[in-house]
Image (spheres, coloured by chain):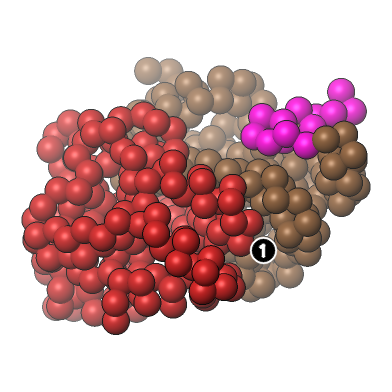
Chain colours: A red, B brown
Amino acid sequence: MQPKEILKEHVSKTITLTDEQFDYFFSHFTYKTFKKGQTIIGEGDKVDCEYFVLSGYLKSFFINDDMKMFILQFAMPTWWASDYNALYSGERATVNVDCITDAEVLCLTSQDREKLCREIHEGEHFFRWRTNKGYVATQKRLLSFMNNDAKHRYEELLAQYPTLYNIVPKQLIASYLGVSRETLSRLYHS
Amino acid sequence: MQPKEILKEHVSKTITLTDEQFDYFFSHFTYKTFKKGQTIIGEGDKVDCEYFVLSGYLKSFFINDDMKMFILQFAMPTWWASDYNALYSGERATVNVDCITDAEVLCLTSQDREKLCREIHEGEHFFRWRTNKGYVATQKRLLSFMNNDAKHRYEELLAQYPTLYNIVPKQLIASYLGVSRETLSRLYHS
């Protein structure tokens, strides 16, 4: 599928736009490709864009004072990624986004998102529901983190993203779960 | 201040409505009072409403299979509370909401929220930005939970809500931080 069709199919799950409206909506996105390992957002960057994944896998993560990495989210095709705190507040990035694999994305600037939301009421509806879902998913991840042991979180992750284990390096899965590589290995073989 | 004025001041931070529009917006909210300890949403409930706090303190929490309580959020005046997963998905509540103190709230049903968002474009804008902020706050809480030790989280909590310590029982603060009452006591006296 072409980028335009992928975005259209995604958006159509929430709202109905005429072809003319969707052409206009789509005209605000910029197509970009990134190589495996490439940084899209680095800590300290000014963040102007959010990224809709067409192909490939991204991760958003942060690194603490002890240089330990924490993975906030994996992003796969039709998911969105950015440092939303930085994007919404205008503060510098505290979260990094980079590429686990080669990736194609569509970028949307904050200015254009707000313009689309103003000009197309349905567009505002789309972005409201996208964030509603992100909010609930983050809340579930927090509850899961507070409540479950690592084995439980591991099983939840596999159930939610069955393909992830073949694509994403084990070290990153361990980081997502908040366990060591050794602990993950025990879970994996148990 | 009257309920209407409190909501108006809150909404005006994000959008501008005419007096007529705000009267209409406000007409969809229902005023309710609850007593200290009273349950607003119980696990397993059907969830139709979200609650804007006028006065008092609420908590949202869940209880795991071992009967351990995890506090997701405290809600104070001008904050919103609900089980948003249940509210948005139509599933039964997995989170409870109850009253730490006597409380006055304004209830808005999902049906009326969607109606207001359809009828008043600015209303949709308001609710989109409210969720954007909730999303970022939840993400920060997740990162803080993954990264920081309990002492750090305790200091963060006090910095964020300086009044909380005098109003909310220590047991609940311990539950919010994910530590035992004894650990909190050590943090408190250190």
Q: Is residue B1 visible?
A: yes
**Residue at 39% from the left image edge and 59% from the top image edge:** A27
**Residue at 36% from the left image edge and 72% from the top image edge:** A4
First to last magenta residue range: B1-17
Give the answer, above or below, for where B124 lies relative to B56.
Answer: below
The residue pinned by badge 1 equals B87
Disc 1 sits on a residue from what chain?
Answer: B
Of the pair B6 and B69, the residue shown nearer to us: B6
Left of A157 or right of it: where is B123?
Answer: right
Give the answer, above or below, for where A66 lies relative to B145.
Answer: above
Left of B81 or right of it: where is B181?
Answer: left
Left of B24 or right of it: where is B97?
Answer: left
Residue located farthest toward the front when viewing the structure as drawn: A20
Q: Give how far across and how far down residue B93 sits, in percent.
A: 65, 66
Mark 1: amino acid: Leu
**Residue at 73% from the left image edge and 69% from the top image edge:** B46
Of the pair A142 and B84, the residue shown nearer to us: B84
**Residue at 33% from the left image edge and 46% from the top image edge:** A49
Residue at disc 1, secondary structure: helix
Image quarter (top left, top right, bottom left or bottom right) of the N terminus of chain A: bottom left
Q: Give how far across and how far down residue A82 sits, in percent.
A: 33, 49
Q: How many neighbours does mark 1 have within 10 angstroms: few (below 14), some (14-19), or many (20 or more)?
A: some
Q: Give how far across and how far down residue A37 sits, in percent.
A: 9, 56
